[in-house]
Amino acid sequence: MTPEPPDTEELLRRGAAGDGAARQQLLTRHRTRLRQMIAARLDRRLAARLDPSDVVQEVLVEAHQRLDDYLRRRPVPFYPWLRQIAWQRLVKLHQHHHAQKRGVGREEHPELPLSGEALGRMADRLTASAASPSHQAVREEARRRVREALAALPERDREVLVLRYLEQLSPGEIAAVLGISEGAAKTRHTRALLRLHAELAGEDEL
């Protein structure tokens, strides 16, 4: 299992020993990361009536209830465990929304695609050094092209890039989220970047 950062490792050790303050720190220190992840995945129709901060609070309450079991077993690094609870909460919210729209009795397994705003933020990060700030038109064009290339990638490739550049997870955290080894996660990331570059090169050839 990928080692935790030293400060997180210390909080986990203290939390396992019964330190309530350490447990609280563990649960709240990732609030901003969780909110960004939830906001990026929240269906726009749900986002119109549901604040991501409320979802975060529900996630932290559930994590608190499950923390003893996690501290005993520690099957994955802490943040990927917390993120998985948030992911499951989002899936349930989307399933409930679809059930209301389509009627009871039809089971739905909705995906959690990125919002358009989140896709734009990811394109911003990938094109941050594409041109100097004074060349605004050049940066906007690069941003448009990268966003379209990201949208054209297979979900498998786009997801690993989202985890790395939008959610800013470490290779070890990405491996835990995807349920693969860290080496496999790095390989998948490299292949996804190559496919993104190929998409951009293909556009250049048009």
Image (cartoon, rainbow, N blue to C red):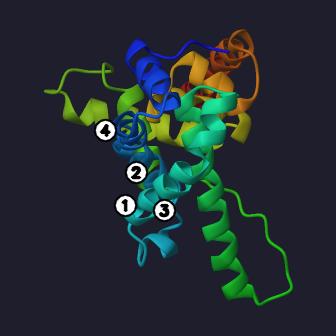
Q: Residue 137: percent from the left, percent from the top?
A: 24, 36
Q: Amino acid at mark 4?
A: Glu
Between the residue at mark 4 and the residue at mark 3, the CA separation in whole angstroms equals 38 Å
Q: Residue 204: percent from the left, percent from the top?
A: 54, 26
Residue underneath mark 1: 53
Between the residue at mark 2 and the residue at mark 1, the CA separation in whole angstroms equals 6 Å
Do we see residue 163 in this rendering?
no
Left or right: 149 with respect to 56?
Answer: right
Number of other residues with Cα within 10 Å of mark 1, as a class: few under 14, some 14 to 19, many 20 or more:
some
Residue underneath mark 3: 58
Q: Which mark identifies residue 161? A: none
Corner quadrant of residue 166: top left
Q: Nearer the viewer, residue 148 or 94?
A: 94
- Mark 2 or 3 closer to N-term? 2
Q: Which mark identifies residue 35? A: 2
Number of other residues with Cα within 10 Å of mark 2, as a class: few under 14, some 14 to 19, many 20 or more:
some
Q: Residue 178: percent from the left, percent from the top?
A: 71, 31
Find numbered disc 4 in the image and state the secondary structure of the residue it sits on. Answer: helix
The residue sitting at 46% across, 31% down in the picture is 15
Between the residue at mark 4 and the residue at mark 1, the CA separation in whole angstroms equals 31 Å
Q: Amino acid at mark 1?
A: Ser
- Mark 4 or 3 closer to N-term? 3
Residue sitting at the far top:
183
Residue sitting at the far front:
18
**The N terminus, quarter of image:** top right
Q: Nearer the viewer, mark 2 or mark 3?
A: 3
Q: Amino acid at mark 2?
A: Arg
